[in-house]
Image (cartoon, rainbow, N blue to C red):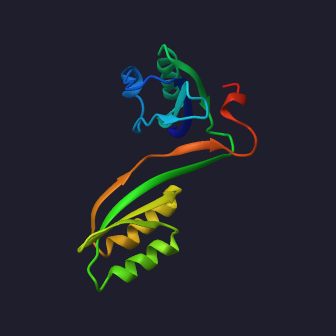
Amino acid sequence: MFWLYWLIISREYWPGFQGCSAAADLISTVWRWGETLDPGISRMTITVSGDVATLEQVVKQLNKLVNVIKISNITEEPAVMRELMMIKVQADPQTRSDIQQIVETFRGKVVDVSLDSLVIEITGNEEKLEAIKILLQHFGIKELVRTGKVAMLRGSKTTRDLNV
């Protein structure tokens, strides 16, 4: 049976690091390293699609990397997960206010305006992003980009506290 698993990988910060190719073939999402409170550590959230054996193989491959400090499986932990999406929507003077009303309803932001389009920034869970995307398709989406999920454990627990 296939499941989605969420892992948080902490590693030593190396500018320009590209050394995850050994496990990259097993991972279904894009790699995004991000800053942490500790300037010597960066981290990313990845989604692994597969069975338990696939998950174990990914973890083994990641643990072979010299600068990986910790891998935390947060699949069964209460966590906050968010994603950023930017959408460029066709917007003429007649439709601009309708689009802005939709954006406000979803607590998004218009971050760029041109004569014939708007660039919208929205963050949230996958369902929220899909919902606004469906509504904006009516106006004509010119371009769309998403970051992929980032995650943080709920409450006072941190990934340093996990024994995974």
Eyeballing the image, is 111 above or below 18? below
Nearer the observer, 14 or 134: 14
Is residue 76 toward the left or the right of residue 90 in the image? right
The outermost residue toward the front is 39
At a point 45% along the width and 72% down the height, the residue shown is: 103
Eyeballing the image, is 74 above or below 65? below
At a point 68% along the width and 28% down the height, the residue shown is: 160
Q: Name the image quarter holding residue 17.
A: top left
Nearer the observer, 102 or 129: 102
| x, y percent for residue 20 | 40, 23
Eyeballing the image, is 107 above or below 81? below
Q: Name the image quarter holding residue 18.
A: top left
Is residue 112 toward the left or the right of residue 103 in the image? left
Is residue 105 toward the left or the right of residue 143 in the image? right
Nearer the observer, 34 or 52: 34
At a point 54% along the width and 51% down the height, the residue shown is: 82
| x, y percent for residue 124 | 53, 58
The outermost residue toward the bottom is 94
| x, y percent for residue 156 | 76, 41
Q: How many marks?
A: 0
| x, y percent for residue 94 | 29, 86
The quadrant of the image that shows the C terminus is: top right
